[in-house]
Image (cartoon, coloured by chain):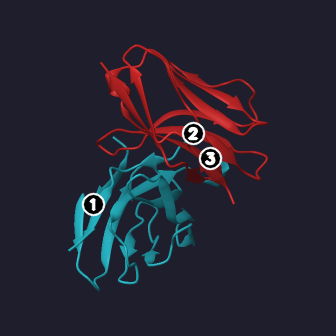
């Protein structure tokens, strides 16, 4: 079955530590996205990529970094510069800008907490 | 900037009854798409229904339908014959060139 796999499901970060969240898709989608969800709030866009080796900042990119070396993979690094990283992180993929009528597909999420 | 507003943080409905969730949006785009997503306690995001802004006809998917008022920038979701499995957080979203902007969500409770 095609889908999006996020790992790990739960992640803990120590102060001053960088951590990387994994996102892999086998839907052959060109576009991939990272969202952050805080309690009582909707999803906010962190970074997105429309094509391999290219990505753009979303609305809350500070303290995060990404890479897109392969079509299937879009890892998110939460750096020590992100002072409030505790949240639920969702990865999504889609067919891209030319297919805006098509919905994005979401992974099951990673919950990141501070130790 | 694009904004999406859901003014009802919480709603409740009796099983088998009908409930309407509100959503308003603001966009400068002339061509855009609107979506309702459902997030049950498992936290998985599930597409409920979508609407193309250029279509006047309201979208329907089984028990789910929308009331799309383009001039008023309103996009409400109606759930008919509510079931216990409909209990979830519901998010309205607007697409801007394949970038989604989400509302803050409405928590729907279904009472047996």
| Residue contact at pointers 3 and 2, CB within 8 angstroms | yes
Query: Where is residue B49 shown, x and y percent of the image?
Result: 54, 32
Q: Is residue A101 visible?
A: no
Circle 1 residues within 10 Å: few <14, some 14–19, many ≥20: some
Q: Position of residue A109 (x, y in %)?
A: 33, 54
Placement of A41 over or under B62, stated as above or below: below
Q: Is residue B22 visible?
A: yes
Q: Are marks 1 and 2 on the same chain?
A: no
* Chain (red): B
Q: Are marks 1 and 3 in contact (CB under 8 Å)?
A: no
Which residue position holds label 2? Answer: B35
- Name the residue nearer the viewer: B9 or B86: B9
Where does the C terminus of chain A fall, quadrant-wise? bottom left
Q: Return the chain for callout 3.
A: B
Question: Does residue A98 appear to the left or right of A64 in the view shown?
Answer: right
In this image, A84 relative to A17: left or right? right
Position above or below: A77 against B69: below
| Helix, strand or loop for disc 3 | strand
Q: From the viewer's side, name the closer residue of B47 and B103.
A: B103
Residue A7 placement: quadrant: bottom left
Q: Are marks 1 and 2 in contact (CB under 8 Å)?
A: no
Question: Which is nearer the eye, B14 or B56?
Answer: B14
Residue matched to label 3:
B94
Alpha carbon separation for disc pair 1 and 3: 27 Å
Which residue in the structure is indicated by mark 1? A7
């Amino acid at each position: 079955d095609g889908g999006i796999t996020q790992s790990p499901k739960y992640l803990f970060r120590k102060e001053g530590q960088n951590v990387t969240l994994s996102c892999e898709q086998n839907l052959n989608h060109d576009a991939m996205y990272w969202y952050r969800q805080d309690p009582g709030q909707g999803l906010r866009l962190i970074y997105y990529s429309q094509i391999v080796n290219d990505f753009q900042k979303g609305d809350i990119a500070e303290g995060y970094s990404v890479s897109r070396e392969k079509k299937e993979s879009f890892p998110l690094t939460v750096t020590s510069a992100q002072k409030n990283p505790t949240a639920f992180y969702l990865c999504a993929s889609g067919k891209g800008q030319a297919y805006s009528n098509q919905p994005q597909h979401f992974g099951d999420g990673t919950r990141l907490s501070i130790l | 900037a694009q904004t999406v507003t859901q003014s009802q943080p919480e709603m409740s409905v009796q099983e088998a009854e009908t409930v309407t969730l509100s959503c308003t949006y603001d966009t400068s785009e002339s061509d855009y798409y609107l979506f309702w997503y459902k997030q049950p306690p498992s936290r998985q995001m599930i597409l409920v229904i979508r609407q193309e802004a250029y279509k006047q006809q309201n979208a329907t998917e089984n028990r789910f339908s929308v009331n799309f008022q383009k001039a008023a920038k309103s996009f409400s979701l109606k759930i008919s014959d509510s079931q216990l499995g409909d209990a979830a957080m519901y998010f309205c979203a607007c697409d801007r060139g394949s970038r989604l902007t989400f509302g803050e969500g409405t928590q729907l409770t279904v009472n047996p």
